[in-house]
């Protein structure tokens, strides 16, 4: 899955996401690698979104950015429309709690604008995301089959 980051609109958030893709920052405060490689997709809401990026516990309870545990929201006033394939930072249900967790929408979700920082968009690989959305999940939207980021990085 190829993701274009919106570094011009959300530079701090885009840098966090980019560094978590490359792993270049090493270990964080929790002594875990600040890297998405090997990180599971821990939540799949069919027809809406998939969520991953818990680099601490892998279950949605952990979160750490390259700036510390969490960092502030950026550019929530920009209306992205949360189209299908929008990549946003997941938060803890309140402002300024961005870390490593993210979600990717599988359908338009404009109601999410103003609540989550949009960091980018999927430019290639929506077919892969569709296959992930077809994975069976339990009643808590957790995949019954292991789904994880096998590799990640940066290219220009």
Image (cartoon, rainbow, N blue to C red):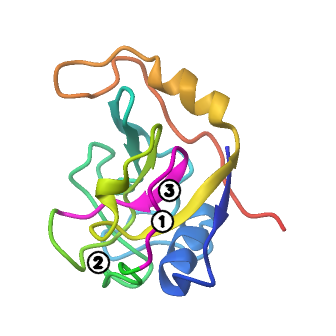
Q: Are marks 1 and 3 in contact (CB under 8 Å)?
A: no
Q: Which quadrant of the view contains residue 125?
A: top right
Task: Tell me which label, 1 or 2, sits earlier in the chain.
Answer: 2
Which quadrant: the N terminus? top right
Q: Can you give x and y, in whole percent of width and height, for residue 91 in the image?
A: 26, 64
Q: Nearer the viewer, mark 1 or mark 3?
A: 1
Q: Can you give x and y, in whole percent of width and height, for residue 127 in the image?
A: 66, 28
Task: Tell me which label, 1 or 3, sits earlier in the chain.
Answer: 1
Q: Is residue 139 above or below residue 83?
A: above
- Report the residue marked by disc 2: 70
Q: Is residue 109 above or below residue 87?
A: above
The residue depicted at 53 percent of the width and 73 percent of the height is 26
Q: Can you give x and y, in whole percent of width and height, for residue 35 in the image?
A: 52, 61
Task: Tell me which label, 3 or 2, sits earlier in the chain.
Answer: 2
Relative to the observer, which residue lies in front, 77 or 50? 77
How packed mark 3 is, by other alpha carbons closer than 10 Å (few <14, some 14-19, many 20 or more), is many
Q: Magenta stretch?
A: 78-92
Left or right: 72 in relation to 27 = left
How packed mark 2 is, by other alpha carbons closer than 10 Å (few <14, some 14-19, many 20 or more), is some
Q: Are marks 3 and 2 in contact (CB under 8 Å)?
A: no
Q: Is residue 137 above or below residue 35?
A: above
- Report the residue marked by disc 3: 87
Distance of mark 1 from mark 2, alpha carbons?
A: 23 Å
Left or right: 66 in relation to 124 = left
Q: Indicate whether residue 149 is drawn in magenta.
A: no
- Report the residue marked by disc 1: 80
Distance of mark 1 from mark 3, alpha carbons?
A: 10 Å
């Amino acid at each position: 899955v190829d993701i274009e980051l919106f570094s011009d609109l959300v530079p701090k958030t885009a840098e966090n996401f980019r560094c978590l893709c490359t792993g270049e920052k090493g270990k964080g405060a929790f002594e875990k690698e600040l890297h998405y490689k090997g990180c599971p997709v821990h939540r799949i809401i069919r027809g809406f979104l998939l969520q991953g990026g818990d680099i601490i516990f892998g279950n949605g309870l952990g979160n750490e950015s390259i700036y510390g545990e969490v960092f502030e929201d950026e550019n929530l006033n920009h209306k992205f429309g949360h189209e299908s394939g929008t990549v946003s930072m997941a938060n803890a249900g309140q402002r300024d709690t961005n870390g490593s967790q993210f979600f990717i929408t599988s359908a338009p979700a404009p109601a999410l604008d103003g609540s989550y920082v949009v960091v980018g968009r999927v430019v290639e690989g929506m077919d892969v995301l569709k296959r992930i959305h077809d994975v069976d999940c339990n009643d808590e939207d957790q995949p019954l089959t292991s789904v994880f980021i096998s590799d990640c990085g940066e290219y220009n």
